[in-house]
Amino acid sequence: MSARSIYSLAVNSIALPVFGINATVPGAVWPGVILVCFCVIAVLIAGRRIEGESKRQWTLLLLALLSAIPAANVIGWIQPSLLHSRQVYWPSLWIAFFLASILGRRSSRALIVLFLLAEASAASYNVWVYRDAMNRADRIASRVQQDVGAMGGGAVEVRVLGVPNNPNGVFLFREELNERIARAVPQAMVRVCERPSGCAADAGTRSAVYQWDATSQAGVSGPRLQ
């Protein structure tokens, strides 16, 4: 098993409910940094509070590892659509019980504060991912508004092709982008699709066609006028 597979298992399966960090953003380093901090804190907590005769904590850790075995066959393609799967939730459920058992005792306040800071960092990063996606949707809508305004009056159709529904784990992004463009250019017919077949052009209508580009700051390339 490669280091990337172990990382995917830890982020997407074992620590999901208590950690739940979005690790789908390409090239992002913060998920790895926060994950390392979280793991160090968890080890410190466990090392200080698990006693040799405490079978409860060791049993919970063993159950977490055993229940993670069925998730091994989905490493590499754990996507948002799989997050409802019990293969993902079972291991992290035992980890949640384990941490509750540890922190429920007289624990170091410093360790508890560090644990909460790691959780807050993960939550802040996840919120940033959504805000970044919504800011991109606004930039696209603003660009389309300018382009359509430059085309003059009359019937106009706006088509945005290749838009995934859940880029970087942001659910229903395509529908949100469609709504924001429609608000920005209410006089235009707007279609946001993943495949060109879902965005067929209407005969006799001028079209401004855009192509989704996740690597660009603008978010799309185009328009291509038809």
Image (spheres, grey):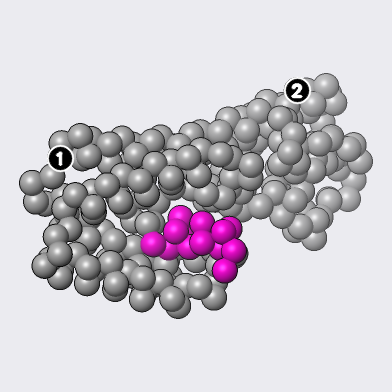
Q: Is residue 122 left or right of residue 200?
A: left
Relative vertical location of residue 97 with respect to residue 181 in this rendering, above or below: below
Q: Residue at x 30, y 51 (%)?
A: 43
Give the quadrant of residue 107.
top left
Q: Is residue 222 left or right of residue 112?
A: right
Relative vertical location of residue 96 with respect to residue 30 in this rendering, above or below: below
Graded by Cα atoms within 10 Å as few (under 14), some (14 to 19) or many (20 or more), the crowding at tag 1 reads few
Q: So how many labels did they put on this image?
A: 2
For the stretch drawn in magenta, the main secondary structure is helix
The question of residue 11 being in magenta is answered with yes
Magenta stretch, residue numbers: 1-14
Quadrant assignment for the C terminus: top right
- Observer-nearest of 162 and 186: 162
- Dot 1 falls on a residue whose secondary structure is loop
Quadrant assignment for the N terminus: bottom right
Q: Residue at x 75, y 23 (%)?
A: 146
Graded by Cα atoms within 10 Å as few (under 14), some (14 to 19) or many (20 or more), the crowding at tag 2 reads few
x and y percent of residue 210 in the render? 80, 40
Q: Residue at x 33, y 56 (%)?
A: 17
Tell me the kind of residue under disc 1: Ser
x and y percent of residue 20 in the render? 40, 51
Q: Residue at x 15, y 36 (%)?
A: 109
- Dot 2 falls on a residue whose secondary structure is helix
Query: From where the camera sits, is residue 178 visible?
Result: no
Mark 1 — residue?
A: 108
Mark 2 — residue?
A: 146
